[in-house]
Image: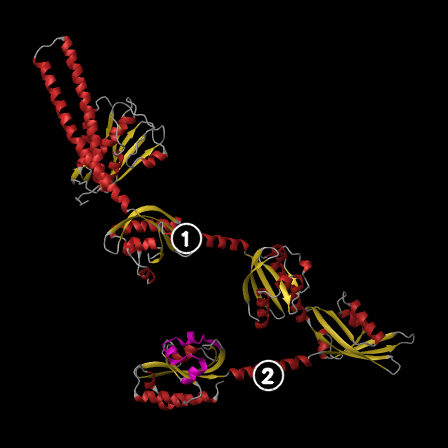
Amino acid sequence: MLLSPLNKVWSMVEQSGFFSLFTTEQSGQAKAEAALFETLQDAVLVCDAQYRLSFWSKQAEALYGWTAEEALGQDVRELLHRQLIHADKDEEQCLFRDHSTWEAELFHRTKSGEHIIVACRSSLISGNEHLFLLEAHHDITSQRQREQVLEEYYRRVRKAIDIGVWRWEFRRDEQGHLHRDGVVNSRMAHLLHVPAHTHLSEEQFFAFIHPDDRPAVEQAIEHTLRTGEDYQATYRLLDETQGERWIASRGSLVTDQQGTPLYAVGIALDITTQKQMEAALQQANRHVTSILEHVADGCIHIDNEWRCTYASKRAEEITGLLRQNFLHKSIWETLPELRHTEVEQYLRLAQETRQPVNYEMFFERTQQWFEVYVLPEDNYLALYYRDITELKNIESLYRERDEMLRRLSDANLICIASSTEADDILDANDAFLSLIGATREELQAGKLNFRALTPIEYRSLDREKHALCRATGVCPPYEKEYYHKRGHRVPILVAAAYMDRSQHYIALIMDITKQKELEKQREVFLGIIGHELRTPLTAIAGSLQLARRRLQRFGTQQPVTDNIAAILHSTDHLLDQSLRQTRVQNRLIEDLLDASRLAIDKLELMLAPVNLDELVGSTVEDLRSTAADRPLELRLLGKPLPVYIDAARIAQVLSNYITNALKYSPPEEPVTIEITATDNEARVWVHDHGPGLSEEARQKIWSRFQRSTDLKTQGRLGGDLGLGLYICQSLIQRHHGMVGVESEEGKGASFWFSLPLTSVPEKL
């Protein structure tokens, strides 16, 4: 199978060895051996046992197109897309078990994508403690192509010789009737399943023809006898073994000098395969036409004379133009407005280059936008188009919105910036650059990053907001800070939107430095007012307490008349009311001071290990003494609940919860205080039977200066500034806990706060 050049390669290898050529470190001898291989005409290559290339000759480079640098180290089977055409033996058994030479014809693909056939001879070579596969490849593509041409030639010759030949003799009987007797060659006899050179009568011949085709064959014969023209007929033969066989028959009539028919000779071809292909093609055409009629895109075919030869139903529906108005007519006649436009240029380009063309066009007649694909076929252009008017309108709307956003950005009324998912800032307006003290050159150089601008304590908040933004598409405003280029922090309010297609964020940012400064000034002012109010209030409370004690001592040290006793009792009651009001005012001032301390982060906690179960019990008992006429139900767990807290502040939270519950509950209904616990946290509940809270009230009740103005208080527990629950939430959060409320209108409310349980004190 292999040509002599391959044998030459092998004889050189067997004689010289060439083992040093395939080692990783090549000596002078190895280089000389490699140079000797370069003198051969065949491609020589060497692989290790895993088929990784370690040598690639110049002839291999010329044959396959890859340089040695590109080929070395690669798997030769994957590099050449090797496919086996023929081999007498299995490759691995021959090489690795029998240690013999493997010969095969292989189908390879070159770097340029061309497929070639090579004769390959491969052998396993050992040397210097290494195993190598030495292969020589000889290109036999041209040889195989010549063989295929010769084979096709001989096939056609055999087919030409294998034609059915027939001869019909004509004779008249005594009455003048014309009779026909036929003789057929071996091929025709084979088609009719009769012995070669069999004489057939007219009746015998027609018995082989399909009944539906007999009238047409009879007419063709009569036409030839009457006119002398060549005989032509196509009919089906009845074949019991292979079913119906299609035959195309042609012949000529021979007459004497008087024009009397003597005989006719002709040929018969078996065209069954052709008929089957025609039927399959017709079925495929019907199938394709059916598909084209139902696809969403319109489809028309234009021949080389620019005539419309086909238009789908969808093409008619999209454009509103009736098919009968432009079928079999020139498109330049039916659509003259397309002449001398880009549409004509695109169509002529596709016709001349025979390459697909894609373009968009606006059709004035129907006021529609179309996307058109032109696919050149053998003798026509196939145009597929779809209506993209709505898409164009959407694009126009998006362009308008982009322009509006651009103008808003350029107006610098608000800071606007876009960034990647890695927080690299892609674009920003001047307002944002001024906010952080950056330049546009730094922005264009890609040196700005939101993560680098953000203090570390806001990183987790940013990750949470980014996840929310990706999930919902938007991120509600939240407060954080950025580093200015000069080092100071800038408080900001930021909101963002996430663009799914481009996978980047657009952030709207407001500088709230002035607002923060005003808030701090306000809190400092409130703190000053609180101190100024508390000082005289303390003096008033002390004077009232002193007056009450002296009044009580006067009534007990000496006898008084009933009239004086009544006056003393009335005065004592007035003093008690005054003291109660001073306590209320003092609580309001304390709330105001606590709120101001929280706002400027000056509230300090005195943390210590505490049993929460005992703390709740003692706090409730203290409140029972001040509200003896109100029922308080206490449900403790009766076991240690270790927490690390500021006991006074947690007692303040619980007292606020209970005071609010007493304020809004009917006097006869009890307020219930209970504790629940899990392995990690304890939760304190305060349940009341008051009017409950609406959904809107539940959302706002934890904010500063929020009061339930629509709820009626019970008893005389005093007013408030709407700071109590805000302070409670802030205190609990500083203890790493949470607050909440469960309530429905008309069904009371259950306020709760939770604290983490701990066995070892932690620094909070």
Name the one closer to the observer, 573 or 734: 573
Q: Earlier in the sequence, mark 1 or mark 2?
A: 2
**Residue 71, magenta (yes or no):** yes
Check disc 1 and report its element: helix, strand or loop: helix
Q: Could you say which quadrant of the image residue 70 lies in?
A: bottom left
550 on left or right of 380: left
Foreground mark, 1 or 2?
1
Check disc 2 and report its element: helix, strand or loop: helix
Q: Is the residue under label 2 in contact with that under label 1 (CB below 8 Å)?
A: no
Tell me the distance, in whole angstroms, between the alpha carbons under discs 1 and 2.
76 Å
Q: Name which residue type carries label 1.
A: Arg
Name the one closer to the observer, 530 or 285: 530
Which quarter of the image is occupied by the C terminus?
top left
Residue drawn at (63%, 66%), measured in percent from left and top?
302
Task: Residue under label 2, please give it.
Answer: 150
Label 2: how many Cα within 10 Å (few below 14, some 14–19, many 20+): few
**Depicted 301 relative to depicted 701: above or below:** below
Residue 271: horizontal and vertical position, in percent?
Answer: 69, 72
Range covered by the magenta-colored residues = 58-84
The label shown at residue 407 is 1
Residue drawn at (79%, 78%), measured in percent from left and top?
252
**Depicted 207 relative to depicted 90: above or below:** above
Q: Could you say which quadrant of the image residue 175 lies in?
A: bottom right
